[in-house]
């Protein structure tokens, strides 16, 4: 049985849940490819009481690679694939703006994550963010939550590019390894009042 969520796991989409690499931009539902450990990782998080919230920068909209109806189709497909595997996302929050455009929602801004906390009425305390980019880690740091940097997607490149400026709580090879670390570490207070 899955318990009612008591805190949030923020998940980046591209390069964290679904396959990504530098130079690639997901523009159609048919291009969605989950990493092999994604389903298992999300099940573990749900089982440990985390609400699953995707926070994603979709600058492809601002840059004209795809439009919002297409993004919605992609997200419906993602929901469908996960639901088929017994996994429910509490929400997908996206910034549609191009980099360089002044907006308040583009990661590393914690704007969308804060909105999710408010809408789900869950505390930032005990929350965690998983992502492959520095923006994910910087967002998490601003929220004061546990940050896990993954080597999938742009992860390896980002590590080279940002070096010591990229300071996550933990580094993992992929989402599943990051989740396993979280659930056995002191960073989870599951079970305590
Ligand atoms: Mg990413
Ligand atoms: Zn934005």
Image (spheres, rainbow, N blue to C red):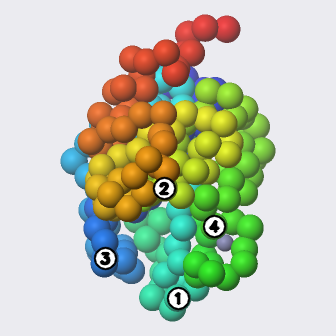
Mark 4 Cβ and ligand 2 under 8 Å apart:
yes
- At a point 61% along the width and 58% down the height, the residue shown is 108
Q: Earlier in the sequence, mark 1 or mark 4?
A: 1
Q: Residue beneath label 1, please? A: 63
Query: Marks 4 and 2: which is nearer the front?
Result: 2
- At a point 73% along the width and 49% down the height, the residue shown is 114
Q: Residue beneath label 2, please? A: 134
Q: Earlier in the sequence, mark 2 or mark 1?
A: 1
Q: Residue beneath label 4, please? A: 106
Query: Marks 2 and 1: which is nearer the front?
Result: 2
Query: Are the two marked residues, 1 and 4, in contact with CB atoms closer than 8 angstroms?
Result: no
Q: Earlier in the sequence, mark 1 or mark 3?
A: 3
Query: Marks 3 and 2: which is nearer the front?
Result: 2
Query: Are the two marked residues, 1 and 3, in contact with CB atoms closer than 8 angstroms?
Result: no
Q: CA distance from mark 1 to mark 4?
A: 14 Å
Q: Residue beneath label 3, please? A: 24
């Amino acid at each position: 049985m899955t318990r009612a969520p008591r805190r949030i796991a923020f998940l980046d989409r591209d390069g964290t849940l679904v396959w990504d690499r530098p130079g690639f931009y997901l523009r159609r539902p048919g291009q969605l490819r989950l990493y092999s450990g994604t389903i298992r990782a999300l099940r573990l998080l749900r089982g440990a009481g985390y609400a699953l919230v995707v926070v994603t920068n979709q600058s492809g909209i601002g840059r004209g690679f795809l439009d919002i109806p297409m993004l919605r189709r992609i997200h419906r497909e993602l929901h469908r694939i996960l639901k088929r595997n017994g996994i429910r996302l509490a929400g997908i929050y996206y910034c549609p703006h191009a980099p360089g455009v002044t907006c308040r929602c583009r990661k590393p801004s914690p704007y969308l994550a804060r909105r999710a906390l408010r809408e789900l009425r869950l505390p930032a305390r005990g929350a965690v963010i998983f992502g492959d980019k520095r923006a994910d880690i910087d967002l998490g740091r601003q929220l004061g939550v546990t940050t896990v940097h993954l080597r999938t997607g742009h992860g390896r490149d980002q590590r080279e590019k940002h070096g010591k400026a990229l300071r996550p709580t933990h580094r993992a090879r992929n989402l599943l390894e990051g989740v396993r670390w979280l659930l056995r570490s002191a960073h989870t207070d599951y079970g305590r009042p």
